[in-house]
Image (tube, rainbow, N blue to C red):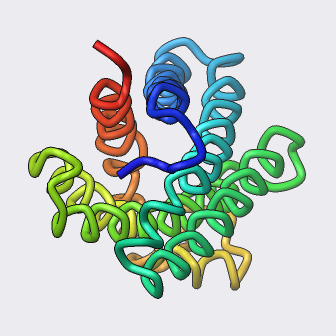
């Protein structure tokens, strides 16, 4: 499943870049907890960059996805584009110091949950074709569903909760989605890229 108007190589490199940005963000957050700044800021930049690249990747894959599943693809594209904007908003809020790390993290979690809905829709459609390996489609579907758990963080955003201690348990549970967008989704992107890049 590749976009007709773009080469597989272009889409492949974009997917690899998105995955690399996501994994770099994971590395930087680990370094932040061990060393401190500037790795927290670098993590936030990588998260925002990965979201932007995900929106572009979805846009490039949209024609093929739309051909397979017209209604689902429209919903999925709207979800990923909205998700990318929400993630970037969260990154800007924490980097600028306008909001604290917790509320900004809720924005990033909710935005990546929307990206997860796109991924789940895309890979669900791919399961019904032979254009991608079955394992890639299943892995993407699992990653997308885990990412989508982050939608439970939305009430925390609406209430403006900016402290973990004052957040309801279900809002904190949204961070389970982080396993999807910090690790599984970047791995999926790189896997997709390796399949699409010329051998």
Instruction: Decide if residue 55 is on the left or right side of residue 125.
Output: right
Depth check: give the residue in front, 94 or 8: 8
Residue 174 visible at all: no
Tell me residue 127's x, y (percent): 17, 64
Q: Image quadrant for the C terminus? A: top left
Q: Residue at x 89, y 41 (%)?
A: 96
Depth check: give the residue in front, 67 or 61: 67
Instruction: Decide if residue 65 is on the left or right side of residue 77.
Output: left
Q: Residue at x 50, y 73 (%)?
A: 76
Q: Residue furthest front?
A: 4
Depth check: give the residue in front, 190 or 104: 190
117 shown above or below 96: below
Depth check: give the residue in front, 137 or 31: 137
Tell me residue 140's x, y (percent): 26, 53
Q: Residue at x 37, y 22 (%)?
A: 197
28 shown above or below 69: above
Instruction: Decide if residue 88 is on the left or right side of residue 187.
Output: right
Tell me residue 6's x, y (percent): 57, 40
25 shown above or below 56: above
110 shown above or below 182: below
Tell me residue 82's x, y (percent): 67, 69
Residue 35 visible at all: yes
Q: Residue at x 28, y 61 (%)?
A: 123
Count of numbered marks: 0
């Amino acid at each position: 499943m590749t976009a007709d108007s773009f080469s597989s190589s272009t889409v492949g490199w974009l997917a690899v870049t998105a995955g690399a940005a996501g994994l770099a963000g994971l590395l930087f957050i680990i370094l932040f907890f061990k060393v401190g700044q500037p790795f927290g800021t670098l993590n936030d930049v990588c998260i925002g960059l990965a979201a932007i690249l995900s929106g572009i990747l979805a846009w490039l894959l949209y024609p093929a996805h739309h051909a397979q599943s017209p209604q689902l693809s429209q919903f999925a594209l709207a979800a990923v584009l909205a998700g990318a904007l929400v993630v970037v908003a969260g990154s800007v809020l924490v980097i600028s110091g306008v909001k604290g790390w917790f509320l900004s993290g809720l924005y990033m979690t909710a935005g990546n949950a929307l990206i997860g809905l796109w991924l789940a829709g895309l890979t669900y459609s791919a399961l019904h074709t032979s254009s991608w390996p079955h394992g890639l489609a299943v892995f993407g579907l699992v990653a997308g569903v885990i990412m989508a758990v982050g939608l439970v963080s939305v009430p925390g955003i609406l209430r403006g909760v900016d402290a973990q201690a004052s957040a309801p348990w279900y809002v904190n549970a949204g961070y389970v989605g982080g396993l999807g967008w910090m690790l599984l989704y970047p791995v999926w992107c790189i896997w997709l890229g390796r399949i699409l890049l010329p051998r």
